[in-house]
Image (cartoon, helix red, strand yellow):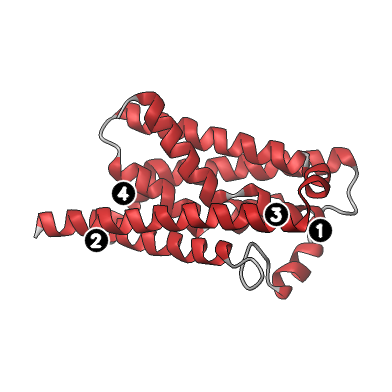
Amino acid sequence: MGIGALLFASFTSLFSVVNPITAMPVFMALTKEDTEAERKLTARKATVYMFFVLITFLFAGTYILQFFGISMSGIRIAGGLVIMKAGFSMMNPETGGRKLSKEDQVAAMEKEDVSFSPLAMPLLSGPGSIAVVIGFGSQAASLTDYMVNGVAVFLTALSAFVILRVAPWLNKFIGKSGMTVITRMMGFIALSIGVQFVINGLGRFFDWV
């Protein structure tokens, strides 16, 4: 796969799982009392934290899991199942979707800074997106692959920042029904990515056996 094709595939895969569009309502609720400057700062800090969390797992996640004796096939299968669960949740936004529990909402409202928790983690860089970047790392064959995937992580974080910055306008433009449609489309893509991760993991396992 060429560099351009790898970058496109990595970016679209990660963006579909991160899906910052569905994080807009939570972001707006947590920053409703903030000024425009404070909201911009929160969005920037959240996406910077998100970038560093994901880039860390891209380069070190595979080795961390191998330290615990988890094989590559196990990493891919487990990651695929996590992404599939996230995809199912996104395809049913009425019952699942991107929401915080009541306890998390209360705790977040009491914080002065919500950029790292709960915005960066677990809203933007949750188990699904972490599983995706670990999958990237497990399939990287060279330093170039790591660098291309790193650029994909950066572009995803940049896209998330832009979306959070225009969240009030975008929320009005898209509307609730539009948000539901986009969430379900992203959920289907995420589900497909999860299935492919599982297939790749099983294929690697049986080749090893």
Please report contact status of discs 4 and 1: CB closer than 8 Å, yes or no.
no
Quarter of the figure with the C terminus: bottom left
Mark in front: 2 vs 3:
3
Determine whether, in the image, residue 4 is placed left or right of residue 77. Answer: right
Q: Is mark 1 on a helix, strand or loop?
A: helix
Residue at image position (24%, 61%) is 69
The answer to which of 205 and 104 lies nearer the viewer is 205
Q: Is mark 4 on a helix, strand or loop?
A: helix
Please report contact status of discs 2 and 3: CB closer than 8 Å, yes or no.
no
Residue at image position (55%, 33%) is 155
Q: Name the residue under label 2.
A: 69
10 Å neighbourhood of mark 2: few (<14), some, or many (≥20)?
few
Q: Mark 3 points at which residue?
A: 179
| Snapshot quadrant of residue 72 | bottom left
Q: Is mark 3 on a helix, strand or loop?
A: helix
Q: Name the residue under label 4.
A: 63
Q: Callout 1, which amino acid? A: Ala
Residue at image position (60%, 51%) is 124
| Snapshot quadrant of residue 96 | bottom right
Q: Distance between the residues labelled 3 and 1?
A: 16 Å
10 Å neighbourhood of mark 3: few (<14), some, or many (≥20)?
some
Q: Position of residue 140 (x, y in %)?
A: 30, 37
Q: Which numbered disc, 3 or 4, marks the residue that appears first in the sequence?
A: 4
